[in-house]
Amino acid sequence: MSSSYLLSWCTFIYLGASVLYIMHWLFRLKPVGFLGTVSTVIGVIVQTAGIGLRWIESYQLGYGHAPLSNLYESLVFFSWATALTYVFVEYKTKSRVIGAFAMPFAAISMAYASFNPNVRDSIEPLIPALQSNWLIAHVITCFIGYAAFAVACGLGIMYLLKNMSPNKDSGLLGAFPSLKGIDELMHQTIIFGFLWLSVGIITGAVWANQAWGTYWSWDPKETWSLITWFVYATALHARFVRGWKGTKIAFISIIGFCSVIFTYFGVNFLLSGLHSYGSQ
């Protein structure tokens, strides 16, 4: 059994879990929601095994590096971190409806990694710029932050849907947690992601100094990472200082995740720079 086999299965498990969570929300079927949880937990376990096995395979091939070095592996890790973050959120809130808005991010990431012919899933040797122990710290911290922002974006969408409806406590939206509950959860998730992203930027700067001789070179990826950081910093600052809550924070959580997507994909494909290897 290879890591590719396990990760391919994980793609279908997450897609199935997303469908189950959506059905649970639309039809109020508790057993279906339970199956969504079971599928997600199984998916996380299978994906953890797949990532671990891919790491071992890297050593067997003589490369010996963590599976975090190209677009395919970063998509897999983002998906894993998003699913794991969501499982924790569901455990804390006991609300499976959130899965209908959070798990699709994990499923889409795995589907893109698995089915896009331009994404190479082969294990390859590291380019010189990536041959550093800082690779693991930088990528893991950044993508845990991205995963938290994905969940926060899902919560932001839920908040706006519920808040804009005249029937907030009935029908499909009645299954959502309260607006106050969604707002508080969204805030906590943004704080969590912001802390990890901050550490990711710092470790990236240290790594850049080691690899390129400077802590900051205004590479497009660095610049957009900083823009993303400022978007979420604005949300947290406005909440603490100006008391922003609810709709404003929900909009910022969605805008912030759009910035994350552009930092992740847009910069790789549209703007050349020192991080161009991330598009392979």
Image (spheres, rainbow, N blue to C red):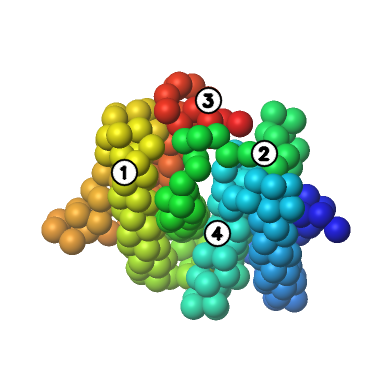
Q: Earlier in the sequence, mark 4 or mark 1?
A: 4
- Spatial CA distance of label 3 from label 4 is 23 Å
- The residue under the point 22% across, 58% down is 239
Residue 38 x %, y %? 72, 73
Q: Could you tell me the amino acid type at mark 4? A: Ala
Structural crowding at the residue carrying mark 1, measured as other residues with C-alpha within 10 Å and reported as few (<14), some (14–19) or many (≥20): many
Q: Nearer the viewer, residue 149 or 179?
A: 149
- Residue 253 vs 129, above or below: the answer is below
- Residue 12 vs 43, above or below: the answer is above
Of discs 3 and 1, which sits in the foreground?
A: 1
Q: Which residue is mark 1?
A: 205
Of discs 1 and 2, which sits in the foreground?
A: 2
Q: Secondary structure at mark 1?
A: helix
- Spatial CA distance of label 4 from label 2 is 23 Å
* Left or right: where 203 falls relative to 158: left
Q: Secondary structure at mark 2?
A: loop
* Left or right: where 159 falls relative to 70: left
Of discs 3 and 2, which sits in the foreground?
A: 2
Q: Quadrant of residue 163?
A: bottom left
- Spatial CA distance of label 4 from label 1 is 23 Å
- The residue under the point 57% across, 65% down is 84
Q: Earlier in the sequence, mark 3 or mark 1?
A: 1
Structural crowding at the residue carrying mark 2, measured as other residues with C-alpha within 10 Å and reported as few (<14), some (14–19) or many (≥20): some
Q: Could you tell me the amino acid type at mark 3? A: Phe
The disc label shown at residue 124, or none:
2
Q: Which residue is mark 4?
A: 81
The disc label shown at residue 269, or none:
3
